[in-house]
Image (tube, grey):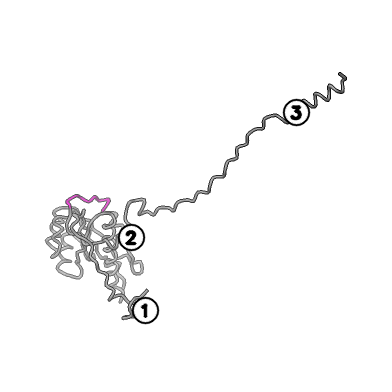
Amino acid sequence: MSYERIVILILLLLLAAALFRPQPVVTVTAPKPETVPEAAASPAETSGLPDVLTVIHQRKSVRSYTGEPVGLPELRELVRAGFAAPTAGNARPWAFVIVTERARLDALADAMPYGKMLKKAPAAIAVCGVESAFRSGESREMWVQDCSAATENILLAAEGTGLGAVWLGVYPYKDRSASISSILKLPEGIVPFSLISVGHPAGTEKPKQKYDPSRFFLQQWGMPFRP
């Protein structure tokens, strides 16, 4: 066999080997679908606490308690809610006294005509007006609104954290004010505005339905609200 034929044969063999060589399997991976991030949970959802509207509509005056004590850190959080209340001109004319001593709670109960639940309550919070922070002139009495807002904030905070509370009015009754001032040793210029009895609710009280469409108007008095 001639040299040329040998070369041609070798080339044909190499070509056949290339044509019939097994091809590698290429695996195509489908793109992963885009993941949509879940909506961030609200603080109420992550903490297990109810949302604000539920707290407002479930709030009730709680006068019966289990006897379980309420810790000072819990009471401090209630007072912090009081400090967060709106206040005219940022006057902040308030101060707060937490009471947990049994003898003092009993004395407060005796001083308040409708405060007998304090005999069983493990704690109370006194909301006081600070005269040196009162505004002047016609706006002086705005302190009453400010301390009312602080009192309501504490009540809502109690409801929202699983505690029970009731608002006991002190101001403007002079006899109650004098008795509370004496029991709490309030200095001159500090006016007791309200007492809040606090405890773990026994579960006997339920929220009252107070919504009244006859007192709900649109644009002007007497025009019924029709959405």
The residue identified by callout 3 is 16
Q: Which residue is drawn at the image coordinates 22% and 59% (left, top)?
A: 165
Tag of residue 52: 2
Query: Is 58 a magenta residue?
Result: no
Q: Quadrant of residue 163?
A: bottom left
Q: Which residue is mark 1?
A: 219
Classify mark 3: helix, strand or loop. helix
Give, as a single range, the part of the protein colored magenta.
Answer: 66-74
Disc 1 residue type?
Answer: Gln
Which badge, 2 or 1, is on the more N-terminal residue?
A: 2
68 part of magenta stretch: yes
Q: Which element is circle 2 on?
A: helix
Q: Label 3 near label 2: C-beta < 8 Å?
A: no
Relative vertical location of residue 24 with respect to residue 207 in this rendering, above or below: above
Residue sitting nearer the eye, 84 or 164: 164
Q: Residues within 10 Å of mark 3 (few under 14, many from 20)?
A: few
Pick the residue in front: 166 or 73. Answer: 166
